Image (cartoon, rainbow, N blue to C red):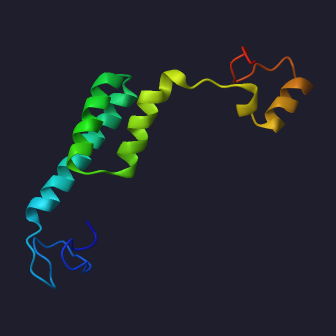
């Protein structure tokens, strides 16, 4: 949290706002919990456990709506629908593969 939710003053690492005195300890704890769950989600995603990662992301989003959590949730939910097509391959790579057919392609071969 960079600014006070009450008066928008810049915050330091103190449990209350230096300008208006708003107690921030509970809000900071909630924000820390959201980041902890987001970190767990990333760890589970790296291990390939997408179901647990999605549950951790949802828990994080219930605490705070972070852009990274929203992107990761969309990635997990849409991963099955994502496939490379010829339009997704950069033109330079497409030409390079035509010029060097003996080098294996990093892209799927089932292009439409």
Identify which residue is drawn at 21% across, 74% down. 4
Location of the N terminus by quadrant is bottom left
Figure disc tally: 0
Identify which residue is drawn at 74% across, 22% down. 105
Image x and y of residue 30, in percent = 15, 53
Location of the C terminus by quadrant is top right
- Quarter-of-image position of residue 15: bottom left
In the displayed orientation, state which residue is furthest to the bottom: 19
Tell whether 12 sits left or right of 21. Answer: right
- Quarter-of-image position of residue 41: top left
In the displayed orientation, state which residue is furthest to the top: 110
Identify which residue is drawn at 70% across, 25% down. 85
Tell whether 94 sits left or right of 41. Answer: right
Image x and y of residue 71, in percent = 43, 42
In the displayed orientation, state which residue is furthest to the right: 99
Picture layout, residue 10 above or below residue 43: below
Identify which residue is drawn at 9% across, 64% down. 25
Image x and y of residue 36, in percent = 22, 45
Image x and y of residue 92, in percent = 83, 38
Tell whether 106 sits left or right of 17. Answer: right
- Quarter-of-image position of residue 20: bottom left
- Front residue of this view, candidates 112 and 10: 112
- Front residue of this view, candidates 10 and 39: 10
Tell whether 45 sits left or right of 111. Answer: left
């Amino acid at each position: 949290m960079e600014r006070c939710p009450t008066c928008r003053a810049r915050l330091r690492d103190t449990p209350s706002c230096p300008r208006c005195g708003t107690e921030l300890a509970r809000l900071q704890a909630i924000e820390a919990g959201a980041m902890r769950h987001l970190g767990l989600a990333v760890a589970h995603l790296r291990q390939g456990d997408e179901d647990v990662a999605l549950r951790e992301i949802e828990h994080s989003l219930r605490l705070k709506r972070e852009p990274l959590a929203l992107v990761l949730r969309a990635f997990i939910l849409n991963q099955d629908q994502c496939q490379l097509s010829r339009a997704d391959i950069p033109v330079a790579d497409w030409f390079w593969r035509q010029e060097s057919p003996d080098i294996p392609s990093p892209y799927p071969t089932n292009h439409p």
